[in-house]
Image: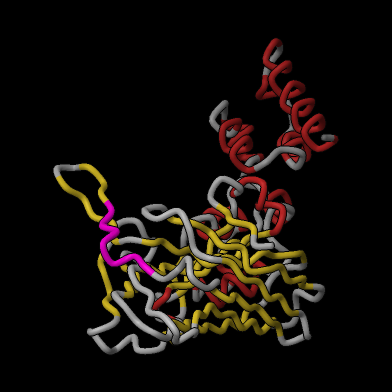
Amino acid sequence: MGAGISAGFATETLLSSSSSSLNDVPESCVSSIFMHLDPPEICKLALLNKTFRGASSADFLWETKLPSNYKYLVKKVLNESPQKLTKKEIYARLSQPNRFDNATKEIWLDKRSGKVCMSISAKSMKITGIDDRRYWNQIATEESRFHSVAYLQQTWWCEAIGELEFEFPQGTYSLFFRLQLGKASKRFGRRICNLEQVHGWDVKPVRFQLSTSNGQKAVSECCLYDPGNWVLYHVGDFAVENDQTSTKIKFSMMQIDCTHTKGGLCIDSVLIYPSEFKERLKKRVHTIS
C-alpha cells in the first residue's frame, strides 16, 4: 500500500512540473523519483521529453529493478557479459522469454516486479514409456510456450520426473504442473477438445512431489479434473535464502496404480513462480489439500 502511494505521489510530482518546464528538472532528480515507480510507468514517462528519456536510462535506476542475481542470469541465459550491457538493456532482455538448456527451459522477469519466473518443458522430463508410440505422442500446439506437449493415449503406469539446478534470487517460490485432460485442436477457427481417450483419473489420485537439495519437501495428491481446460496443479513451495548458491530441485507426478488404465492426458510443463503470484494465478490454479 505504501509503495503504491509513493509511486502515485512521484508520478503526480513529475506531471505537476509541466506547468513550468519539464526540461528544467535535473535528470538526476527525475531518476531518483523514477526509483519509486515500476518499469512500465518509467517507460511511459520516458516518452514525455528528452530529459525524462535520459533519466530513464540511468544504470543506478535499473539496477534497483533487477533481481539480485542478474549477473548470473545474463551469463546463464543471455550468454553475455554483464559489463557489456547497460542495466536497462539487461532488464529489457530478461523481461522477454529466454530459452536455455537446449530450449527445454524458459525464463523471464515479471515486467512490473522484476521477479524471476520459469517454465520447464515436458521434453526435459523423464516420462515412463515416452518413446513408445502405443502410449505417448508429442503433439504440436499453439497452447504451449514450447509449441508441443506430451500426450498420453493409455497406460497402466504414468510417471514424469524432472530436475533443475539454478541460482534463484532470495524468496519463496511455488511449483506447478500444467496439465490438461483431453486433446485440443482447432476446427473452422474454433477450439475443440477431444475427450474420447480421457479415463481413469477419477479412480485414484495423482501423487505430486517436490524436494530440494537443502532438505525442503512437499507431497500432495489429487484426482485430475476439469477436462478440456489447462489447470495448474500446485505441488508445493520452496524457499531460497542464498542467491549465490545453486538450488537443486526434483519434482514428479505419478499415478502408478496398475489396477486400472488411464489416458487422455496432456503434460505441457512445470512452472515456477514467486509465491506471491498465487493470488494472480488463482483462476488457473488447483490448490491440493
Query: Farthest front residue?
Result: 259
Q: Quadrant of residue 147?
A: bottom left
127 w.r.t. 47: above or below:
below
182 w.r.t. 37: above or below:
below
What residue is shown at x 53% (from left), y 66% (from top)?
223
Q: How is the image coloured?
A: secondary structure
Magenta-span inclusion, residue 197: yes
Please report the bounds of the magenta region as a residue range.
193-199
Tell me residue 59's x, y (percent): 68, 53
Query: Farthest top residue?
Result: 19
What residue is shown at x 28% (from left), y 56% (from top)?
184
- In the image, is 202 to the left or to the right of 34? left
Tell me residue 268's x, y (percent): 41, 67
What residue is shown at x 67% (from left), y 47% (from top)?
279
Q: Quadrant of the C terminus?
A: bottom right
Magenta-span inclusion, residue 107: no
- In the image, is 128 to the left or to the right of 192? right
